[in-house]
Image (cartoon, helix red, strand yellow):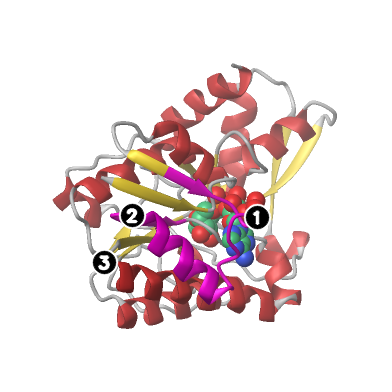
Amino acid sequence: MKAMILGASGLLGKALMREWSGDEVVGLTSRDVDIRDREKVREVVEEARPDWIVLAAAYTDVDGCESHPDLAFAVNRDGAVNVTQAANRADAKVVFLSSDYVFDGKKTAPYGTEDPRNPQSVYGRSKAEAEVRLLEVLPECCIARTSWLFGTGGKCFPDTILKLAASRPVLDVVNDQRGCPTYSVDLARAIVELCRTHARGIVHVTNAGDCSWFEFAREIVKAAGLATEVRPISSQQMARPAPRPAYSVLSAKSLEPYGIAAPTWQDALQRYLQERQG
Ligand SMILES: NC(=O)c1ccc[n+]([C@@H]2O[C@H](COP(=O)([O-])OP(=O)(O)OC[C@H]3O[C@@H](n4cnc5c(N)ncnc54)[C@H](OP(=O)(O)O)[C@@H]3O)[C@@H](O)[C@H]2O)c1
């Protein structure tokens, strides 16, 4: 099998490049191909002839998307369509990375893959519209929604908390948004498995269990053996440009047919801390 990873310099892309073994893997960044450039995308896909394309490339700055909606839609929706059309022509399969932010966060039980999309932010809308378009272009494509990604080799929540905790005695963290932290290594392993098992349709891929950002931060500080006090605050006390869903826990049911069982986020956090020290 030959796999092409778009977004190979990102948090997930780096983990995929490290974790994927036993197959031929080509990793591309925006310097190799800008996914907004339809002709170039077609060229690189036709040249490489991959069996699978993992589309991890995206404009992921959720607040930045609010002030640059044109860029958000150009990369996250139209760029994804370019890649999927090229895949279609070259007979390649696609795993597209989507987000929990396609949901409005009004539920109080885990979101299933069939739950209606109702994004509240530009980033969420760009991903939701991409999902709809991709399923039109390539109905058998796989849409892997994930959430709260963390890992080494890029900016992420645990890294920010650890850096702040090293210099501050107290940290205030929002306690009214709930989701599933996801370790890039575990997500990468699950994606490899999804490709090997010819996954199609929408799947939810996160670590098991859920928490608020406050609970996540408290566990990070504790696991790192730091004495920093972590205090819960509300989202209103920490206004940000993009609205976030209050509850975006994704149900893991869709992974069952593929025999993928995700480790808990607490276990993943321990492994992340080891990798970070490493
Ligand atoms: N991070 C999260 O919490 C989260 C949650 C849910 C879903 N996701 C989704 O999971 C996927 C991976 O996220 P991530 O955190 O690994 O992303 P990331 O670290 O921000 O990396 C983004 C990647 O996309 C590439 N890229 C950006 N614009 C591009 C363009 N126009 N053309 C080609 N490549 C472009 C970047 O390349 P350069 O380095 O060359 O710019 C980089 O490799 C994304 O689809 C994201 O939306 C992430």
Magenta region, residue range: 26-55
| 1 and 2 marks in contact (CB < 8 Å) | no
Is 217 placed left or right of 238 in the picture?
left
The vertical placement of 273 against 199, above or below, is: above
The vertical placement of 105 against 52, above or below, is: below
Q: CA distance from mark 1 to mark 2?
A: 19 Å
Question: Mark 1: is the Cβ under 8 angstroms from ligand 1?
Answer: yes
Local packing at callout 2 (Cα closer than 10 Å; few below 14, some 14-19, many 20+) is: many
Q: Which residue is mark 3?
A: 91
Front one among 140 and 111? 140
Q: Which circle's residue, 3 or 2, is located before the other in the chain?
A: 2
Which amino acid, mark 1?
Arg
Image quadrant where residue 273 sits: top right
The circle on residue 31 is 1
Where does the image place residue 116, in percent across and percent down from the top left?
Answer: 36, 79
Q: Which residue is mark 2?
A: 50
